[in-house]
Image (spheres, coloured by chain):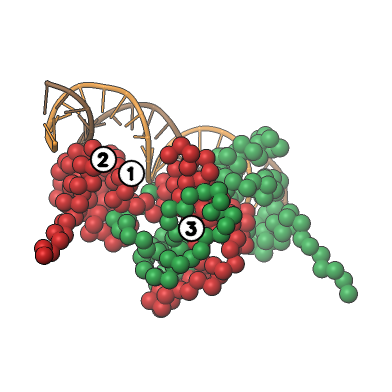
Chain colours: A green, B red, C orange, D brown
Amino acid sequence: MQIPARLSSVDFLREKCREHGLKVTPQRVAIYKELLKSKDHPNAEALFNRVRNTFPDISLDTVNRTLLSFAEIGIIDIVEGYGEPRRYDPDIKNHHHFRCVNCGTIIDFAEESYARIKVPQEIKKTVVVLNKKVLLEGYCHNCRKKI
Amino acid sequence: MQIPARLSSVDFLREKCREHGLKVTPQRVAIYKELLKSKDHPNAEALFNRVRNTFPDISLDTVNRTLLSFAEIGIIDIVEGYGEPRRYDPDIKNHHHFRCVNCGTIIDFAEESYARIKVPQEIKKTVVVLNKKVLLEGYCHNCRKKI
DNA sequence: CTCGGTGCAAAATGTTTGCAAGTAC
DNA sequence: GTACTTGCAAACATTTTGCACCGAG
């Protein structure tokens, strides 16, 4: 029996690009490799500066477009910052949100049991946790029909 | 025994402003009242357009500054959009985040038990949930010293 | 060879700042 | 009266778009 081949990160990128009809350009490889090394959830500009060390002629536009493409084919995630304008909520009681990944609609809901979610020891030891929020992501009623 | 007086929304605003040394201007009252009526977590511009119906001479800048002030004194929340640039995460396995409300640092962590978080029926009925994320918010190791 | 990708420049969008005039307290 | 707030204008930051050239498949 053969040991299953483990895809290297670049092979994974190649495969996913092929699946989605994207070309594997040196820029995309460089951006993906740099992001894999990054543990700090960088924004486009921070990543741009890192990639420039190995790829001096790359442009910020390419980094922006590439990251969006990667997010679209699902090989990276967009976190906490969504690049959207700030949105405000007058409800300061603890409650939770569903967020449509397509249109950004947010639906509030209460769920008493979430108050009992436990905070891992490793986190408790280093930071001060003020509140716990559950974010459900998916498609809202309207968008699920379109997709 | 007296029934405790229930603060009207504007009285609540007055009290909190006084506590924090902010003046209660007609603009602030109008913005707060309008936000209370909004169930859709509007951004500054959307709210600006609504407030203009009752306060035609208000400026977008005032709405922006007021909302930030309100968030600072804790009478409203900033949700999902943080007005920050997009940030990217190469880790697409399900994991969770701690986010520092002061400096924006994100710390990843895994917590197996979160997979068993239940989705309320009311949500399940109308939307498609793709994933469940827990977001812990508070002060990171560095910021908790400063504040 | 062909179509998608890149780099550049410009536009669009959203947020912040500086300042003189106005107003809550 | 004073310090905070406002509205306006300009600056800034980030993202998006248009387009000619280039290169991966």
Whichever of callouts 1 and 3 sits on the residue coming sooner in the sequence is 1
- Chain under label 1? B
Question: The numbered mark 3 sits on a residue in which chain?
Answer: B
Q: Which of marks 1 and 2 is nearer the N terminus?
A: 2
Residue at the image position 45 percent from the left and 63 percent from the top: A134
Discs 1, 2: same chain: yes
Q: Is residue B14 left or right of residue A87?
A: left
Indicate the secondary structure of the residue bearing disc 1. Answer: helix
Q: Residues within 10 Å of mark 1 (few under 14, many from 20)?
A: few
Q: Which amino acid does label 3 sit on?
A: Leu
Q: Where is mark 2, residue-wise?
A: B20
Query: Alpha-carbon neighbours of circle 3 within 10 Å: few (<14), some, or many (≥20)?
Result: some
Residue kind at label 1, given as amino acid type: Glu
Q: Nearer the viewer, mark 1 or mark 2?
A: 2
Can the viewer see residue A82 in this picture?
Answer: no
Reply above or below: A134 against C1: below
Q: Are marks 2 and 3 in contact (CB under 8 Å)?
A: no
The outermost residue toward the front is B1
Toward the right, the furthest residue is A1
Determine which residue is flagged by label 3: B135
Give the mark, 2 or 3, whose residue is nearer the N terminus.
2
Asked whether disc 1 touches disc 2, contact meaning CB atoms under 8 Å apart, the reply is yes
Image position, residue A50 (x, y; %): 64, 38
Amino acid type of disc 2?
His
Residue at the spot 68% in from the left edge and 35% down from the top edge: A53
Residue found 60% across the figure and 42% down from its top:
A47
* Residue with the mark numbered 1: B72
